[in-house]
Image (cartoon, rainbow, N blue to C red):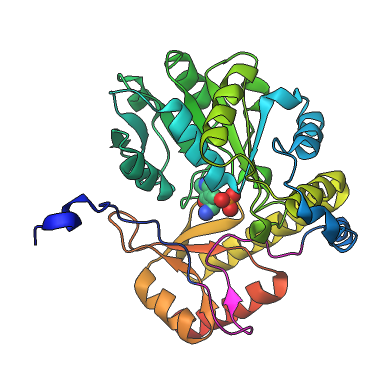
Amino acid sequence: MEKQGFRKNLINIEPYVAGEQPKTADIIKLNANENAYPPSPGVQKAISAFDAEKLRLYPDFSSEPLKSKLAEYYGLKPSQVFVGNGSDDVLAAAFRAFFNSDRPILYPDVTYSFYPVWCDILKIPYKTLPLKEDFTMNVNDYTQPNGGIIFPNPNAPTSIALDKSEIKKLLDANRDVIVVIDETYIDFGGESCIDLLPEYENLVITRTFSKSRSLAGMRLGFAMASEELISYMNAVKDSYNSYPVDAVAIAAGCAAVDDDKYFKDTIAKIVSTRDRLTKALEDMGFTVAKSSANFLFASHNKYTAKEIFSYLRDKGIFVRFFDKPRIDNFLRITVGTDEQTDKMISAIKELVV
Ligand code: PMP
């Protein structure tokens, strides 16, 4: 029905829908790609040692301590790092700063479903390009005129990484627009493009503390790019929220980066469970995409994704099902602890074997 009066001017968007948040503690929650393990013990220490008196003051407006730590870790200058309130916040700043063309921005048809939401809210024209039948990206499609490009590597919800040689082809064909690579899941597999930053001054890489560093609840994300591009992201940030990262988050983030051994050990555990789960699912009649992330994208040869999703949900195991074209017969399953994984495998076995 057409809206009348003041209702005509209300915003018309379809908001992003996050994974369900269970209300009871005994749920096995594998629907939001959170880390199966807690953050480094150093994070707990940093939070416990935090002096609440400091909260009287605004936090460091440019999150300097965290920026410097990240810059050192990744071999960049602090002025090449942008820090925000989760990578969603960082991506929103990037969309505002970089996608201002009349030409459409390009991204895959199956990808992170927040991209169309930002395009709608910011009135950015966009065009989606279909992934191949096997859900891999065809970089040759990205040679048409455009106002910018964004894609996750590894992609979500497919879990599939794009080879760096292919990414280079895409970058070589798109030197006149900004290319944002969303590396939310890169620590679990695939090859980062950080080392391509000096060669491509139009490249922006976004990252998060939510997945590989187990800090989804803290809301910390960052971007890496040339000093010039980061200065534009800072200008956007300073135009709508000058202090996105709070003082406790800065302290926790620094502690997380300091504990590199814990970070690498946790990733190794998740990768090993991921590979074991892939095999177990394949043995039970699933086709599983080759994952480079902390989740799997799987489809069964007899039961529909919706049936398995509902069955698992009734047993207190939450996975993600997307009622969307092309992917409505796939489940996105976050890799949990070994114990959670074993429980899920047993539950699925009862249904399908
Ligand atoms: N990009 C992708 C591809 C994601 O899957 C997510 C997680 N939902 C994000 C960005 C945002 O993560 P966060 O805001 O927690 O950093």
> From the viewer's perspective, is 29 left or right of 121?
right
**66 above or below 224?**
below
The residue depicted at 70 percent of the width and 23 percent of the height is: 79
Q: What range of the chain is rendered magenta?
A: 21-38
x then y, percent, for residue 91: 51, 40
Q: Is residue 70 visible?
A: yes
> From the viewer's perspective, is 207 left or right of 333?
right
Q: Is residue 29 magenta?
A: yes
x then y, percent, for residue 199: 61, 13
x then y, percent, for residue 210: 65, 53
Q: Nearer the viewer, residue 230 or 208?
A: 230
The residue depicted at 78 percent of the width and 25 percent of the height is: 75
Question: For residue 108, which quarter of the picture?
Answer: top left
The residue depicted at 30 percent of the width and 55 percent of the height is: 14
Question: For residue 279, which quarter of the picture?
Answer: bottom right
The residue depicted at 51 percent of the width and 26 percent of the height is: 167
Q: Nearer the viewer, residue 236 or 264?
A: 236
Q: Nearer the viewer, residue 105 or 52?
A: 52
Question: For residue 138, which quarter of the picture?
Answer: top left
**66 above or below 8?**
above
User: What main secondary structure does the magenta stretch of the protein show?
Assistant: loop
> From the viewer's perspective, is 303 left or right of 34?
left
Q: Is residue 133 visible?
A: no
x then y, percent, for residue 21: 52, 73
- Residue that sits furthest to the front in the current view: 56
